[in-house]
Amino acid sequence: MENNKKKIGKILIAILFILILLFIYFAFLGGDKKNHFSKPEEKIEEKTEQQKYEEMKAKSEVIYTFDEELERDREWSEEDFKKMAANFAERFGSYSSHGNYGNIVESKYLMTKEMKSWADSYVVDLKNNSEYSGEFYGMTSKVFVSPEIENFNPESGQVEVLVSTQRFETKDAGGESVFNQNIKINYIKEGGEWLVDSASWQ
């Protein structure tokens, strides 16, 4: 009887030992030898050049709101024109092959009648003479230093601002390039509002 108990005990110990070995094998050594207790690897999705452009453009966009009547009556300072010109330069200088010339069309409310007429003609000309290759192309403009006032004469209704921008060019084929470029913005007072009468890249 005593011998049977010893045999049963040895068998149970052997079975337990085998179970421990099987657990160690499957948990740490089995299959593809992955650690089943480690977190699954996160897949990092590669962003397209268009997605990178859209993210950069969203970060650079600043929306300014104001009360038109209060703006008409108050006295404008050089700092006001610097901020306004920086906002226009970033909006006007950021576009993509998928943007349908939104940088120009969506900036028209900031323009004089004469410049709106130029903008309409320019967009029509671009649509008629530009061929879309199928590859993504984007340009994002950011103001990196304070704009310079080159002519400040609000009494006569004219102000000229030089804005220095850093421009990020993105292409499907060629990655990204960065360069600096200035834009000269002329403001005149029309209908009680200060509006962009011309904007030329230098």
Image (spheres, rainbow, N blue to C red):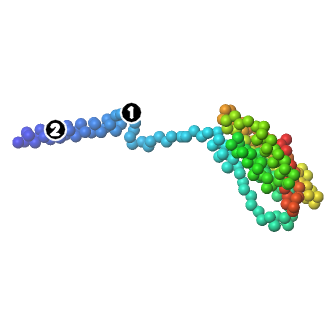
Q: Quadrant of residue 3?
A: top left
Between 202 and 14, which is closer to the camera in this rendering?
202
Can residue 137 be seen by looking at this rendering? Answer: yes
**Quadrant location of the C terminus in the rendered image:** top right
Residue at x 85%, y 67% (from the top left corner): 73
Q: Residue furthest left?
A: 1
**Quadrant location of the N terminus in the rendered image:** top left
Q: Which mark is residue 11?
A: 2
- Vertical side of 11 occupied by 148: above or below: below
Q: Position of residue 50 (x, y in %)?
A: 65, 41
- Neighbourhood count class around disc 2 (C-alpha, 10 Å): few under 14, some 14–19, many 20 upward: few
Between 24 and 142, which is closer to the camera in this rendering?
142
Between 52 and 29, which is closer to the camera in this rendering?
52
Q: Position of residue 31 (x, y in %)?
A: 36, 33
Q: Mark 2 and mark 1 in contact? Answer it, CB < 8 Å.
A: no
- Vertical side of 168 occupied by 192: above or below: below
Mark 2 element type: helix
Residue at x 71%, y 51% (from the top left corner): 61
Report how far apart the C-alphas of labels 2 and 1 lie in the structure. Answer: 32 Å
What amino acid type is highlighted by mark number 1? Asp
What amino acid type is highlighted by mark number 2? Ile
Mark 1 element type: loop
Q: Position of residue 71 (x, y in %)?
A: 82, 64
Q: Which mark is residue 12?
A: none
Q: Which residue is mark 1?
A: 32
Residue at x 91%, y 55% (from the top left corner): 158
Can residue 77 be seen by looking at this rendering? Answer: no
